Image (cartoon, rainbow, N blue to C red):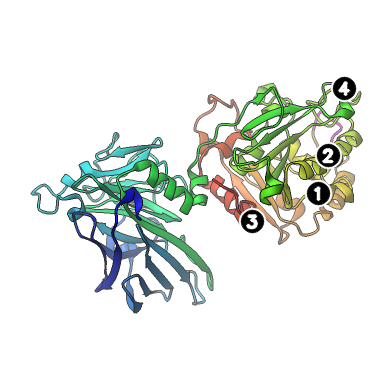
């Protein structure tokens, strides 16, 4: 039984660069895909097309009506193997791109061109673009039929329309009119002539969504260049299913969870009263601090199940330390206002914001350290309790922090061997332990002894993965700690992400909120988290 309760069968064949998808359900009968139209170099938006295209040859390795294997060999020696399979209502693509040469390859993206004239019933229309009224992308999380609002009309080549995702440079797409709108997801598709069916396509990673000039639609897959001997995996899908946008979105989110994370704009959950439950963020005072204002916050993701023991489920955990109170920078210093950890996890992990305990043990310290020993002891007690109570996988516990909290990742989180053993990875944004002394305070002075102590703390990382992010660049941090193999660096430009300050949620570029908004820099953070296996078995 197929989607929508209708019977049918998808079959495929490939000949002379065309993949034909046969379907006895839809009114067009056959969907043709120019597979592959082209492989392309970067920097293509305002350049002659023949200077962008990389010559290639495609060979058929094997074929049945439900499975095809192809091999593309590019002029520069890159080899891309394609496994194409026909399923009930989907054609799946699994690509392995390999660079066996000793040179870096410029192969940046590929173009499967889906001809939709017959499917939309417009193949005989005098107006070559009458299929637009049946074609759609998703903008502002809504299905938007073409021509969409803000339809662009000027480019090196016209007509057509390109939608560029946030992880791709706008100088690096098809030289057709470029929309100012960013797509909400990686889907582009159309409705059949009888309105009963839809066809949609997506790739991960993808370079662009594109409406072309030969009654065609594209989701063009991204290679991103290949270093010598590098190998990359790419996945794609063409859905042919009942005309139900919500069902399409569900399938897409199941098939491409990483891409969903990259597109999602996050709204951090506000702290509410009550006990911890899934989908809520609450403030908790431990029995040791009853009668005081010392507290932490805890967020359980919507996918957290209180029956985790019975169903043998486990969850990742992000632990966070907040920045200093600095009103001129828009920072409150409160655990309630920290958001870096939520952005790291995309709201899909248990998220714990730990306090700095003040010198009297009566409140959270909003600026600098307070009672360091009490703060360390608090973490040593609370983190294992959270792990045991909420089904945390101890191999997926990330410690992170912003500003003061970034320094605290090492200064507090690596204070001694016992607390250092709690973490499986570390993420910092804006500042790092041991880099500088702070004028106007006693912190970090004298610098030589501070750096000596920081180096001792750093050694407790003991090869575990570290991601150091810094607005404006990480060069000063690199000068101090070098470039150990377990440490990744990310230069962040919050101005490029948010635009001109002040903005609604921040008045200064020194901010932890940049991970809430889709950007190429956030994608690199998510890729780092994915390589750690942090999102393994996480339900979107």
- CA gap, disc 1 and disc 3: 17 Å
In this view, 20 is above or below 128: below
- CA gap, disc 3 and disc 4: 38 Å
Q: Which mark is residue 379?
A: 2
Percent from the top left, x then y, of residue 471?
A: 62, 40
- Left or right, 526 with respect to 167, comes to right
Please tell me which residue is depicted at 85% across the width and 46% down the height of the picture: 419
Stretch in magenta: 439-445
Q: Which residue is mark 4?
A: 362
Membership of 478 in magenta stretch: no
Residue 401, by quadrant, is top right
Q: Earlier in the sequence, mark 2 or mark 4?
A: 4
Q: Earlier in the sequence, mark 1 or mark 3?
A: 1
Please tell me which residue is depicted at 19% across the width and 50% down the height of the picture: 120
> Which residue reaches farthest left?
126
Kind of element beneath mark 1: loop
- CA gap, disc 2 and disc 4: 16 Å
Q: Earlier in the sequence, mark 1 or mark 2?
A: 2
- Left or right, 86 with respect to 434, comes to left
- CA gap, disc 1 and disc 2: 9 Å
Please tell me which residue is depicted at 24% across the width and 39% down the height of the picture: 147
- Residue 74 visible in the shown view: no
- CA gap, disc 2 and disc 3: 24 Å
Crowd band around label 1 with a 10 angstrom C-alpha radius: few (<14), some (14–19), many (20+): many
- CA gap, disc 1 and disc 4: 26 Å
Q: Earlier in the sequence, mark 3 or mark 4?
A: 4
Residue 512, by quadrant, is top right
Residue 361, by quadrant, is top right
> Which residue reaches farthest top?
291
Percent from the top left, x then y, of residue 114?
A: 27, 58
Kind of element beneath mark 2: helix
Q: Which residue is mark 1?
A: 422
């Amino acid at each position: 039984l197929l989607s929508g309760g209708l019977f049918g069968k998808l079959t495929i064949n490939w000949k002379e660069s065309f993949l034909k998808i046969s379907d006895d359900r839809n009114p067009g009968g056959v969907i043709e895909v120019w597979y592959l139209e082209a492989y392309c170099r970067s920097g293509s938006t305002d350049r002659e097309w023949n200077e962008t295209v990389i010559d290639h040859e495609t060979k058929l390795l094997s074929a049945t009506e439900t499975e095809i294997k192809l091999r593309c060999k590019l002029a520069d020696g890159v080899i891309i193997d394609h496994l194409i399979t026909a399923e009930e209502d989907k054609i799946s693509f699994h690509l392995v791109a390999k660079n066996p040469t000793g040179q870096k390859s410029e192969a940046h993206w590929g173009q499967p061109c889906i001809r939709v004239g017959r499917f939309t019933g417009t193949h005989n229309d005098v107006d070559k673009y009458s299929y637009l009224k049946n074609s759609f992308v998703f903008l502002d999380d809504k299905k938007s039929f073409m021509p969409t609002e803000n339809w662009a009309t000027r480019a090196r080549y016209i007509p057509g329309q390109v939608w560029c995702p946030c992880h791709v440079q706008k100088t690096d797409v098809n030289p057709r009119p470029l929309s100012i709108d960013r797509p909400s997801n990686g889907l582009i598709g159309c409705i059949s002539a009888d309105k009963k069916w839809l066809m949609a396509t997506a790739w991960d990673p993808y370079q662009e969504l594109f409406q072309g000039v030969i009654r065609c639609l594209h989701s063009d897959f991204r290679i991103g260049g290949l270093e010598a001997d590098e190998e990359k995996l790419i996945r794609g899908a063409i859905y042919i299913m009942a005309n139900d946008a919500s069902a399409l979105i569900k399938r897409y989110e199941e098939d491409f969870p990483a891409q969903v994370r990259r597109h999602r704009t996050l709204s951090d959950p506000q702290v509410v009263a009550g006990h911890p439950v899934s989908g809520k963020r609450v403030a908790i005072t431990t029995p040791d601090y009853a009668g005081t204002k010392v507290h932490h916050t805890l967020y359980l993701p919507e996918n957290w199940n209180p029956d985790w023991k019975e169903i043998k489920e486990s969850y990742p955990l992000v632990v966070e330390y907040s920045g200093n109170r600095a009103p001129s920078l828009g920072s409150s210093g409160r655990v309630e206002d920290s958001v870096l950890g939520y952005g790291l996890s995309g709201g899909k992990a248990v998220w714990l914001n730990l306090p700095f305990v003040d010198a009297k043990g009566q409140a959270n310290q909003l600026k600098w350290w307070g009672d360091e020993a009490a703060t360390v002891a608090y973490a040593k007690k609370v983190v294992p309790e959270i792990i045991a109570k909420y089904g945390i996988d101890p191999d997926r516990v990330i410690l992170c922090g912003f500003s003061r909290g970034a320094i605290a990742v090492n200064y507090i989180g690596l204070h001694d061997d016992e607390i250092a053993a709690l973490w499986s990875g570390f993420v910092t944004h804006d500042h790092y332990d041991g880099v500088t002394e702070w004028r106007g305070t006693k912190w970090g002075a004298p610098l030589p002894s501070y750096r000596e102590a920081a180096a001792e703390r750093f050694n407790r990382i003991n090869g575990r993965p570290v991601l150091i992010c810094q607005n404006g660049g990480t060069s000063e941090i690199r000068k101090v700690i070098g470039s150990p193999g377990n440490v990744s660096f990310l230069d962040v430009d919050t101005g490029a992400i948010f635009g001109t300050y002040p903005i609604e949620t921040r008045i200064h570029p020194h901010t932890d909120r940049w991970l809430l908004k889709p950007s190429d820099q956030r994608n690199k953070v998510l890729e780092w988290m994915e390589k750690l296996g942090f999102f393994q078995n996480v339900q979107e």
